[in-house]
């Protein structure tokens, strides 16, 4: 794709109407966020253990919702509250627009408390005091954790409550999602403030799709890492929406492929759209019967006989 074509596509890329009456700080991407929430929830692999944490989308411009968080790998950008599974599947995203209120007018100054039956709260004196509340797990059975003892100058075993141990084992879902997204994130830059959010949501959708693919039977026969999965997705879209070649231009087909299924995804081979046959300059091996033929499928770029075409694309 040429630079001008790319600029033309990005020029007309919009996510909300200019007449949208919403006045939130993220009004430009709110329809996209709502759509992604629905899709993420529809395909959510049911999981009992979920984690909530903040995730940063890098942004270095000027915006009312831009945050600066010291100690984070990404200090400047848009903060978002993310609900994720232990493997990193993002279930829900809520962009943070800033503080919405101060001290409650009902309670005023001082303190307030609520008491709910069936909840246990535990304080564990680690390097700092850690307070955890749970409706399911308790203190027993006690686990062990290794900590450095300044007095003994060595690592020692200390008792750890069961609910603290369970929390530590499942709390990194959002961090795992950030790791997956950051591995192969979109590097295209634009002057629009909403572009980093759009790129972040595309990367989040791709990593969610990759995690779902890993749970399918196809992943056991053809495992793919995230990079290979993204390349396969791009390959499918390029084949599905490619433009037809100009009639009369010399044919420059590639050599035969030993494994047709790897070169032509099933989504393209079986979509029954645009699979026209034309004669090539030389004979090559048919993708179905393995005999020589001059006929080639324009879309799949595979040699196939007329009598084999219907079965090959079925």
Image (spheres, rainbow, N blue to C red):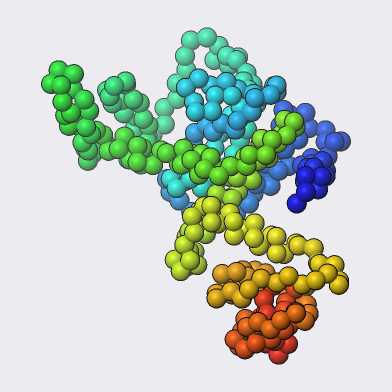
Q: Quadrant of the C terminus?
A: bottom right
The residue shown at (64%, 60%) is 235
* Residue 224 percent coordinates (x, y): 49, 59
Above or below residue 251? Residue 50 is above
Residue that appears at 49% across and 33% down: 53
Q: Nearer the viewer, residue 17 or 115?
A: 17
Q: Which quarter of the figure has residue 11?
A: top right
Residue 117 relative to residue 210: left or right: left
Image-quadrant location for residue 63: top right
Query: Is 214 left or right of 240, judged from the image as shown?
Result: left
Question: Where is 234 relative to 283, above or below?
Answer: above
Q: Which residue sits furthest left?
A: 152
Residue appearing at x 45%, y 21% in the figure: 113
User: In which quarter of the view is residue 22 placed?
Assistant: top right
Q: Who's the residue at 52% across and 43% down the image?
A: 183
Q: Nearer the viewer, residue 270 or 79?
A: 270
Residue 299, given in percent of the width and then of the height, sits at: 73, 71
Query: Residue 111: where, in percent of width, then height?
Result: 47, 14
The image shows residue 135 at horizontal and vertical percentages of 38, 38
Looking at the rendered structure, the number of numbered marks drawn on it comes to: 0
In this view of the protein, can residue 44 be seen by the observer?
A: no
Q: Nearer the viewer, residue 276 or 102?
A: 276
Depth check, front residue: 255 or 6: 255
Residue 74 vs 93, above or below: the answer is: above
Vertical placement of residue 45 versus 72, above or below: below
- Whether residue 168 can be seen here: yes
- Left/right placement of residue 238 relative to residue 228 reads right
């Amino acid at each position: 794709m040429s630079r001008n074509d790319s600029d033309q596509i990005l020029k007309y890329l919009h996510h909300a109407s200019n007449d949208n009456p919403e006045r939130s700080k993220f009004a430009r991407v709110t329809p996209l966020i709502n759509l992604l929430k629905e899709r993420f929830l529809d395909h959510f692999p049911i999981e009992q253990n979920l984690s909530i944490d903040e995730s940063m989308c890098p942004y270095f411009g000027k915006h009312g919702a831009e945050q600066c968080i010291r100690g984070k790998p990404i200090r400047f950008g848009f903060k978002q509250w993310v609900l994720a599974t232990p493997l990193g599947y993002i279930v829900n995203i809520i962009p943070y627009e800033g503080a919405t209120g101060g001290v409650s007018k009902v309670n005023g100054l001082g303190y307030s408390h609520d008491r709910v039956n069936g909840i246990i709260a535990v304080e564990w004196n680690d390097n700092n005091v850690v307070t955890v509340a749970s409706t399911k797990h308790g203190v027993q059975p006690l686990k062990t954790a290794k900590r450095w003892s300044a007095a003994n100058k060595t690592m020692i075993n200390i008792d750890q409550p069961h609910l603290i141990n369970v929390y530590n084992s499942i709390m990194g879902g959002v961090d795992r999602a950030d790791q997956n997204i950051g591995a192969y994130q979109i590097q295209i830059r634009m002057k629009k403030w909403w572009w980093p959010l759009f790129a972040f949501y595309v990367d989040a959708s791709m990593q969610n799709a990759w995690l779902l693919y890993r749970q399918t039977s196809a992943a056991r026969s053809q495992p793919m890492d995230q990079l290979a999965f993204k390349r396969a997705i791009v390959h499918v879209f390029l084949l599905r929406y490619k433009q037809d070649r100009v009639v009369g231009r010399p044919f420059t087909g590639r050599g035969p492929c030993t494994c047709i299924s790897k070169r032509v995804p099933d989504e393209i081979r079986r979509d029954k759209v645009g699979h026209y046959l034309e004669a090539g300059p030389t004979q090559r091996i048919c993708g179905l019967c393995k005999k020589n033929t001059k006929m080639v499928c324009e879309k799949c770029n595979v040699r196939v006989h007329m009598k084999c075409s219907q079965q090959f694309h079925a």
